Amino acid sequence: MNGAHDCGGMMGFGPVVAKVNEPVFHAPWEARMFALMSAVGDIGGWTLDDDRAACEAMEPGHYITSSYYEHWLSGLERLLQKHGLATAEEIASGTAAIHGKPVTPTAAEVVWSAVTAPGSYERKADEIPLFKLGDVVRTRHLNPVHHTRLPRYLRGQVGEIVACHGAHVFPDSNSRGLGEDPRHLYTVRFNASDVWGNAARDVIHADLWEPYLEAR
């Protein structure tokens, strides 16, 4: 999705200024938002990719002028309605119109350990990898209307496979409720001078799924 969230390489936003001793939360409501998303996400049954797609669906003008946790709030409101946990009227009024569903949430320590475990999104796949270390590939010039992890600034660029990570959950499918659809994942190295069109000697490393790539 070519939304406001995919702004890598765009100009006019000014410098990135790192704040010294910046707090984790800038206001009490942000801490509540973090806790609410952590709790309701388990009950709602949606995936991390579904969550990202919901945040990206925010109106572009609002997205670029709002804070990080406002993105979370917008995404959560969308997911609550999508999964039948709340209506737009209930969210607007702050009052439930019907009784909630009885649920037994998963213990937080179990969820966190599973999500952060090494290889937690790695899966088995029957397909043989199309690429290997050292292969030169080109990223496809995709413009999907759905969630994708292929950055817009890297589309149509030539790079080299420098690491192979096995098959992982494919976000483009998982975010749309089409299943995990495991695809092979690679680290691809690009020359910054090729991507940005200047004389920079830096390189860019991006983890990209196989459907994003084609043999050069």
Image (spheres, helix red, strand yellow):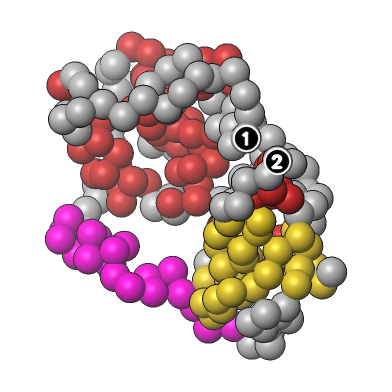
Contact flag, marks 2 and 1 (Cβ < 8 Å): no
The percent coordinates of residue 146 (x first, y second) are: 67, 43
Q: Is residue 70 magenta?
A: no
User: In the image, which is nearer the foreground, mark 2 or mark 1?
Assistant: 2
Say which residue appears at 54% left-offset and 41% top-offset: 53
Q: Is residue 25 left or right of residue 15?
A: left
Position of 115 relative to 63 (above/below): below
The percent coordinates of residue 149 (x first, y second) are: 59, 51
Q: Nearer the viewer, residue 43 or 35?
A: 35
Element assignment for label 2: loop
Say which residue appears at 65% left-offset and 58% top-offset: 190
Which class describes the residues within 10 Å of circle 1: few (<14), some (14-19), or many (20+)? few
Quadrant where the N terminus lies? top right
Pointer 1 residue: 9
Q: Is residue 98 visible?
A: no
Q: Which residues are magenta?
A: 107-125
Which class describes the residues within 10 Å of circle 2: few (<14), some (14-19), or many (20+)? few
Q: Is residue 108 magenta?
A: yes
Q: Is residue 189 visible?
A: yes
The percent coordinates of residue 115 (x first, y second) are: 31, 62
Element assignment for label 1: loop
Query: What type is the residue that disc 2 sits on?
Result: Asn
Say which residue appears at 76% left-offset and 60% top-offset: 158
Pointer 2 residue: 198
Query: What type is the residue that disc 1 sits on?
Result: Gly
Q: Which mark is residue 40?
A: none
Say which residue appears at 63% left-offset and 29% top-offset: 10
The percent coordinates of residue 95 (x first, y second) are: 28, 17
Question: Could you tell which of marks 2 and 1 lies nearer the N-terminus?
Answer: 1
